[in-house]
Image: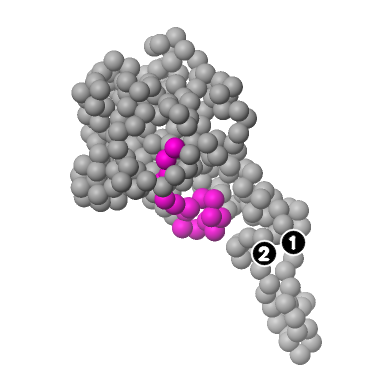
Amino acid sequence: MDISNVTIENPAMGIYIYRNTLPKELDIVNRLEKTIAENNDEWFKWSEALVGDRVSMKDYRDCVDFKVGRHDIINRSKVVNSDLKNNDEWFKWSEALVGDRVSMKDYRDCVDFKVGRHDIINRSKVANSDLKNIYDDIDVRLKACLEHYTKKFNIKMEFQEVVNFVRYSRGQHFQVHSDHGFSYICTVSTVMYLNDDYVGGGLWFPHINYTYQPQAGDIVLFPSTFIYAHAALPVEEGTKYSAVTMFDYNDRAHGGLHPRSNSSMN
């Protein structure tokens, strides 16, 4: 993606804001909620956001989230139907028909369902098709911003975390924290703001005395260290949606573990 026409701001050392990189036409929030509502895989549902070593601390972090990467979408599609344990109506018992799909219970009275390898693969793709599209819509734009950012600082990020979609309702927040710390290692942090029809919910960097008020479509990149500790300020009215991910030089510090298992995301 070409971001030559994107307005780029550098309000503080190390912090870059890429304005309106996610255009409203993408309608990410509505597509995301629709996909979650229609997806019966619990892996892709809103759940309480945890911190550190997957601990619940609502006074510290109070919101809901779910994490997803391309790897998840592909492999959960396989898992959902791997043992034919799923909620897709395509794979449910129903009245058995005869001939040109006619009901004749006095002739054939039972239930059945039909399945082939083609069905399993293609129905799996249908279940998560727009989730993959949402991920791709975000990822291609994020990568373009990351390329610009890393060139500025002569670094190269080869490891990407899964994308963490986060939803804050009224009064919800995430207190001051750094992304790189005792439970997780990363170098560059990114926050993508999916809407702005709410009050409050600013991104506050107390150590550098800077507060950013989110605007829909903006992507913010900054270093992950303790100097750039930050908070998601409480939402006063409305509902705030964001998407967060981290980058690192490589996967050495991530131990080959699935990213979901060891990240707390912000």
Residue 211, compared with residue 40, is above or below; it is above
Label 2: few (<14), some or many (≥20) within 10 Å? some
Of the residues shown, which amino acid type is indicated by label 1? Answer: Val
The residue carrying mark 2 is: 91
In the image: residue 123, left or right of residue 155: right
The location of residue 207, given as percent across then percent down, is 25, 22
Q: What stretch is highlighted in magenta?
A: 35-52
Label 1: few (<14), some or many (≥20) within 10 Å? few
In the image: residue 164, left or right of residue 73: left
Quarter location, residue 2: top left
- Marks counted in the figure total 2
Of the residues shown, which amino acid type is indicated by label 2? Answer: Phe
Q: Say which residue appears at 32% left-offset and 27% top-offset.
A: 229
Residue 92, compared with residue 58, is above or below; it is below
Q: What element carries label 1?
A: loop
Looking at the image, can residue 31 be seen?
no
Q: Does the magenta stretch include residue 31?
A: no
Circles 1 and 2, Cβ within 8 Å, touching? The answer is yes
Q: Say which residue appears at 40% left-offset and 29% top-offset.
A: 179
Quarter location, residue 224: top left
Q: Where residue 72 is drawn, which disc sits there?
A: none
Q: Say which residue appears at 79% left-offset and 87% top-offset.
A: 107
Q: Where residue 115 is drawn, which disc sits there?
A: 1
Q: Nearer the viewer, residue 149 or 207?
A: 207
The location of residue 115, given as percent across then percent down, is 74, 61
In the image: residue 265, left or right of residue 61: right
Quarter location, residue 242: top left
Chain-order first, disc 1 or disc 2: 2
